[in-house]
Every structure is written in C-alpha cells, then in structure tokens.
Amino acid sequence: AQSVAQPEDQVNVAEGNPLTVKCTYSVSGNPYLFWYVQYPNRGLQFLLKYITGDNLVKGSYGFEAEFNKSQTSFHLKKPSALVSDSALYFCAVRGYNAGNNRKLIWGLGTSLAVNP
Amino acid sequence: ETGVTQTPRHLVMGMTNKKSLKCEQHLGHNAMYWYKQSAKKPLELMFVYNFKEQTENNSVPSRFSPECPNSSHLFLHLHTLQPEDSALYLCASSQDAGGRGDTQYFGPGTRLTVL
C-alpha cells in the first residue's frame, strides 16, 4: 500500500538555526513527492516537488528538499530558520499506479515552531 | 495568494439546513478538487473534476453534492449534515488531474461548523 509518514508531530528550532522536517514514503514505482505549508487559518501553499533529476530540489521561501531513494525519504530543509516559518508542513506522494495516479497520498503534518 | 478563492470563509449551520460552498480558480486550470481537513487526520480527498467531468468520488456520503459548471467554478452543496462533518473544506485546482507531476494549488478553505 502507498503511504507517507511524517515521524515528528512537532519540531522546535531556534531562529537562525538550520531546520529539517522529515518525510518517508512507500509507493510502487518512481515517486513524485511534494511539500506544502499551511499557515494558521489558511489553505495549503505549494513549496516544492521532486519529479526526476537532481536529488536536491529548491523551492519557495528558501526551502529545499533532498530525495533519497535508498532511504525512501524526502526531508525538507532550510539553512537558517525564521520565526515566520512557524507553520504546519505536509509531505505528499503520488506513486506510479494506473488506478491511482491522480491521487496524492498525504502525511499527517508536522508542526514547526521557530523560537526567537 | 494562489489564485484560488473560496466563499464563505466561515459557515455555521444546523443539521437541517442547506448551504453551498463556492470555489473559483483564476489560474486557467482544468482540474478542481474538494478536500476535507480534520485535526489529526490525513487530508481526505472528496471529489475530483477533470475537464468538467467528475473523475473521483471517494465514497463521500450523499449529503455532500458537488457541482462543476465550468473549469473555473466548483460548488459543494450541503444538506442534512452531521456534527462530525465539521471541518475545514479545502478547494484546489491543477492543470490536469491525470498528470503525475501535476501540482495542486489550494484556496484558503471554508471552516464549517455543524451544530
């Protein structure tokens, strides 16, 4: 079965420190991977996606993510966290399955708190 | 903003009411989606329209009825809801729901409370 896991409910980092939000996945075939962010009382905003090519993907607001096929992971990173990065982060995957290629499989989300 | 708008932003309704949620996208996309977001649960896909045809109905109760009159507008008609239907309802759009690399863009959501 296809699945996405975000093993941490909450991540706390100090402003200016690097941050990592973890995501692992299980899909058949090559994965298409996405990260979204949700600020309070807002919808989800697209950050970045991995389709193919370079394992390091750069996205919006200084975020990047590293695709690791052997570890089936797609961790979100930022070199220097800002207080304004505090939000809920969602990882999603779309596998290669003829019956399900439209559906995104979503993680439960990780709440990121950046402390001043 | 992402180019996807939703109205109303907040809605309180009784179990016997009938109401509708509206979504409009200004991105020139061909696919539109309804999702339900509840605390501590993964995002639940409810309906998908691709080129105005409904391509997904994810076992949603009949008290939720979608309508997609054109590729820019999507409605969710609500009637005789239950308190457990209280949630954030998100609309999204994308270029083509059949594309594996297709990216979905979300509206701000409607916070629904059923009394």
Image (cartoon, helix red, strand yellow):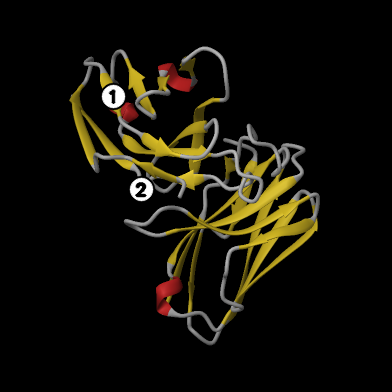
Residue type of the residue flagged with mark 1: Thr
Left of B76 or right of it: where is B85?
Answer: left
Question: Do callouts 2 and 1 mark residues in contact (Cβ within 8 Å)?
Answer: no
Residue type of the residue flagged with mark 2: Leu
Left of B49 or right of it: where is A40?
Answer: left
Residue B37 screen position, x and y as percent: 44, 57
The quadrant of the image that shows the C terminus of chain B is bottom left
Left of A111 or right of it: where is B94?
Answer: right
In the image, what residue occupies the spot 61% across and 35% down? B103
Mark 2 closeness class: few <14, some 14–19, many ≥20 residues within 10 Å? many
Please state which of residues A91 and A43 is positioned toward the viewer in this rendering. A91
Q: Chain of mark 2?
A: A
Residue B109 screen position, x and y as percent: 52, 53
Left of A73 or right of it: where is A35?
Answer: right
Disc 2 element: loop
Circle on res. A108? 2
Q: Chain of mark 1?
A: A
